[in-house]
């Protein structure tokens, strides 16, 4: 069971950058027994050997000095060819053997950002920046919520919107919630981007137990199910 | 006569007839030599340059995706995120004396040297540059200040708030009909109509007795080179090596883009 888990953990991030691969393999190598290591390294070598032709990875390093010089090779090659189409995946085998030495001897290594991760990183950074200004609580469908919104044109006091969250659309920085309420006899649904700088405060007042993710059925039900004082 | 240039064409100056000009259309090579010079021979054999002048040197980038950007005043702007692979190195400087026009040739996207042919590798080694896949030229009025193997850094060339022109290959839509391709209106769906999405009439009667050339008809749509003009740069992120441009850009994420300063009449279009 454990070996199966280990195999899956090592096989799934094969497409990841070599830095990620070395860290995951190093942490798993340190936790599991050494008798698992020979099994996994051979299976990875069988899978990865048709891809590479880099002579620097053929030599296995057991001693500390060899690991340092080999890891220098490991560092230079990804710097030069990180954006090359095929990622050299055999670094995994070598780093399995000298995992702990690689980590300790090369801490200030700059991990190159892959272009495929940039969008995720941008969204995370934008959300972190918005969290510094104002923390956003965890909003779920069914929360009865009160939102204080500043309208830049008016510069009056903040407008207050209260209602039940009927849906949440996750889109990174533009994650939105739809809030429904009966105002002056008519049902009103407003969409708020929860990380917007115009929203000054979001407060969860109550929570109603619901069994759907989107409460669109409230549009057809009686108005009293959508009224909130 | 007008010459339609496809993005994957390289013209070889033909020496057989001096009065006619012709382009050889070739399929894409392993290195996409886009936007290189298209020459035309005039009567008597003199060369005429067809590429238009740019307002300044530009860079090449990769479209990464789109997201929303909250501006400081609270306004939300849809932005396209453009990333930069290793490249944007000057590979050749063309001057009036040597080539008949002034241009800067820029390479993009480092590849393994096995992926390029030996002539391409030799061309890049002459500049001392790394092996790169794409080469594009930016025709300028003056090429001072550029040297071979000079790295073009996008945050020196562009600032936030600048207007840029971005061109790239659009999304291919395949063989499409008149309605999608040329915004034709469809016929009625009921009331006995037998024509819903057809072209309708394609010409007059006995005079002229033929269909005009260039009549809008179904055909392949998309997959062409298009330029979107006057887009604002919203943000430049130096540590991620990323530019955020307001609006949408041609192609899907992963597409090659050519970003140049916007050519605005009266401001920076060079007078020739």
Image: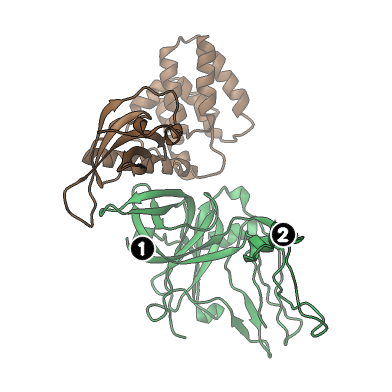
Chain colours: A brown, B green
Residue A195 image position (x, y, % from top left): 31, 42
Q: Secondary structure at mark 1?
A: loop
Q: Quadrant of residue A43?
A: top right
CA distance for labels 1 and 2: 58 Å
User: Is residue A38 placed above or below A111 in the rendered structure?
Assistant: above
Residue A3 image position (x, y, % from top left): 52, 12
Residue at the spot 42% in from the left edge and 66% down from the top edge: B164
The chain letter for the residue carrying disc 1 is B
Q: Are marks 1 and 2 in contact (CB under 8 Å)?
A: no
Residue A157 image position (x, y, % from top left): 16, 48
The chain letter for the residue carrying disc 2 is B
Position of B11 with respect to B51 (left or right) is right
Front-most of residues B228 and A150: A150
Q: Which mark is residue B258?
A: none
Residue at the spot 67% in from the left edge and 87% down from the top edge: B45
Q: Quadrant of residue B267?
A: bottom left
Q: Earlier in the sequence, mark 1 or mark 2?
A: 1
User: Is residue A30 placed above or below B259 in the rendered structure?
Assistant: above
Residues flagged by tags 1 and 2 on a common chain? yes
Q: Crowding near pointer 1: few (<14 within 10 Å), some, many (20+)? A: some
């Amino acid at each position: 069971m454990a070996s199966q888990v280990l195999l899956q953990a090592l096989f799934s991030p094969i497409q990841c950058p070599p830095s990620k691969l070395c860290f995951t393999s190093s942490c798993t190598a340190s936790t599991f027994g050494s008798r698992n290591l020979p099994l996994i390294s051979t299976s990875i070598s069988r899978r990865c050997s048709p891809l590479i032709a880099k002579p620097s990875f053929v030599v296995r390093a057991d001693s500390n000095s060899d690991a340092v010089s080999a890891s220098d090779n490991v560092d230079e090659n990804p710097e030069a060819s990180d954006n090359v189409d095929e990622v050299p995946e055999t670094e995994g085998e070598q780093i399995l053997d000298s995992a702990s030495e690689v980590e300790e001897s090369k801490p200030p290594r700059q991990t190159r950002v892959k272009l495929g991760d940039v969008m995720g990183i941008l969204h995370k950074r934008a959300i972190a920046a918005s969290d510094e200004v104002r923390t956003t609580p965890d909003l779920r469908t069914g929360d009865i919520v009160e939102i204080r919104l500043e309208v830049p044109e008016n510069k009056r006091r903040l407008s207050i919107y209260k209602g039940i969250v009927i849906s949440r659309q996750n889109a990174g920085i533009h994650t939105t919630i739809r809030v429904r309420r009966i105002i002056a006899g008519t049902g009103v649904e407003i969409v708020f981007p929860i990380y917007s700088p115009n929203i000054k405060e979001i407060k969860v007042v109550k929570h109603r137990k619901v069994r759907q993710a989107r409460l669109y059925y409230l549009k057809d039900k009686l108005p009293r199910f959508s009224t909130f004082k | 006569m007008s010459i339609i240039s496809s993005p994957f064409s390289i013209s070889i100056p033909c020496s057989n007839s001096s009065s006619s000009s012709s382009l050889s259309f070739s399929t894409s090579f392993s290195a996409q030599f886009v936007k290189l010079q298209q020459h035309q021979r005039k009567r008597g054999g003199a060369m005429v340059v067809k590429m238009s002048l740019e307002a300044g040197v530009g860079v090449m980038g990769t479209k990464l995706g789109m997201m929303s950007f909250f501006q400081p005043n609270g306004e939300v702007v849809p932005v396209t995120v453009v990333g930069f692979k290793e490249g944007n190195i000057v590979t050749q400087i063309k001057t009036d004396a040597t080539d008949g026009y002034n241009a800067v040739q820029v390479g993009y996207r480092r590849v393994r040297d096995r992926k390029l042919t030996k002539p391409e590798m030799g061309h890049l080694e002459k500049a001392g540059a790394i092996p790169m896949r794409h080469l594009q030229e930016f025709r300028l009025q003056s090429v001072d200040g550029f040297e071979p193997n000079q790295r073009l850094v996008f945050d020196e060339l562009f600032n936030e708030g600048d207007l840029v022109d971005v061109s790239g290959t659009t999304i291919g839509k395949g063989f499409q009909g008149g309605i999608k391709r040329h915004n034709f209106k469809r016929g009625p769906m009921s009331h006995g109509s037998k024509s819903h999405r057809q072209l309708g009439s394609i010409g007059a009667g006995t005079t002229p007795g033929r269909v005009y050339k260039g009549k809008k008809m179904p055909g392949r749509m998309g997959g062409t080179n298009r330029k979107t003009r006057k887009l604002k740069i919203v943000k430049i992120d130096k540590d991620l090596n990323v530019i955020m441009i307001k609006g949408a850009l041609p192609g899907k994420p992963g597409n090659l883009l050519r970003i140049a300063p916007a050519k605005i009449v009266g401001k920076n279009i060079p007078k020739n």
